[in-house]
Image (spheres, grey):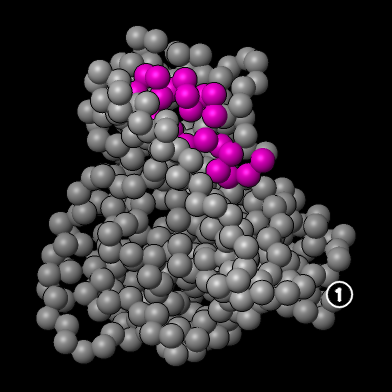
Amino acid sequence: MGLLTGALPDFPWDTLTPYARRAREHPGGIVDLSVGTPVDPTPAVVRDALVSAADSPGYPTTHGTAELREAVVRWFARRRGVPGLDPVAVLPTVGSKELVALLPALLGLGAGDVVLHPAVAYPTYDVGARLAGAAPEPCADPAARLERGPGDVRLVWLNSPGNPDGSVLGVAELRAVVDAAHAAAARDGRPVLVVSDECYAELAWDAPWSEQGVPSLLDPRVSGGDTTGLLAAYSLSKQSNLAGYRAAFVAGDPAVVARLLEVRKHAGMIVPGPVQAAMAAALDDDAHVAEQRERYRRRRTLLRAALEGAGYAVDSSHAGLYLWVRPEGVPQDCWQTVADLAGLGILVAPGAFYGPQAAGHVRVALTAPDEAIAEAAARLAGA
């Protein structure tokens, strides 16, 4: 089953169109909280770095500049509790979505190979497996799945903090998956790669994560200091408002990174040079991240209180850019909740986009200007 012949699910966002139309009919217009697209300014320190590097006539390096990779190493040590990462084991990517969608194919996975991903998950994990001709398998307990077999799992996706539900995996939970993957590889004689999508890690709201930080898969408490079979993916879209730059990276097992680098050189999958310079500047500046985190904290506090005051419950949502919401009391299908909120002119994403287990929830994004969040809160209070 090849790239052009594999069966892909319908693009889910098209099904939201009638609800968007209904929300636009509200006298005050639509407040769109359905998509996690940053709306705040790109920090000046990043824009200045981009402009300074704008004279860029030559081809950039696929592996990324030494300055960028060293900035990633410093950031991992300073912000994620991962000291001593090898710059060779860092690779910039054109945003993180392309890595998620293409990683199984870049690794050579195909028929007979299983890709595990969270049971409540961003749909691109599923799509990436299908593009490669592998089998996606939603899984709430990957460690148990690896332990019981069969030995067909080649790739395990973790997502912490999670999209859409804001769940966070602790050190013990991450370590259990790593240990199970190593044991399965030794038992079955086939490598099992564990990859953690960590792009919301700088946006932790609840204790203990807000005080201790969200642990990375590469944290020595998780990896034991050995990154073999482990990758962590990260995007600057969320923490630095760089979605338009397509600025991300992956780091971990040097052998796997070397394989990805080889393929990406052949394919011309290169982050533009000025963007690499901007990434390095963003990674070395913690002040703008703290400022952006505070913006989201204010919006989250206001919106959560309004939702709960209007009779909704917020589950999990310990970190990230979303509130994971359901009506308090009697369970209700997510599409009815979408319709109810669209009647207030508020557009949200149905949990059904993120797997069958999510069908009772909706995802409410914090990525709207302050005035839009305030308007949504006022409508909820009025309701």
- Choose top left, top right, bottom left or bottom right for residue 191: bottom right
85 to the left or right of 60: right
Tag 1 residue: 187
Confirm whether the magenta stretch covers residue 38.
no
Q: Position of residue 143 (x, y in %)?
A: 76, 57
Confirm whether the magenta stretch covers residue 347.
yes
Q: Quadrant of the C terminus?
A: top left
- Choose top left, top right, bottom left or bottom right for residue 306: top left
Q: Residue at x 61, y 76 (%)?
A: 2
Q: Which residues are magenta?
A: 335-356
Q: Nearer the viewer, residue 295 or 220?
A: 295
- Choose top left, top right, bottom left or bottom right for residue 112: bottom right
Judge the density around disc 1: few (<14), some (14-19), many (≥20) Cα neighbours within 10 Å: few
- Label 1: which secondary element: helix
Q: Is residue 339 above or below residue 15?
A: above
Q: Position of residue 167 (x, y in %)?
A: 57, 42
**Residue 87 visible in this rendered orientation of the protein:** yes
Q: Residue at x 35, y 80 (%)?
A: 270
Q: Position of residue 175 (x, y in %)?
A: 69, 59
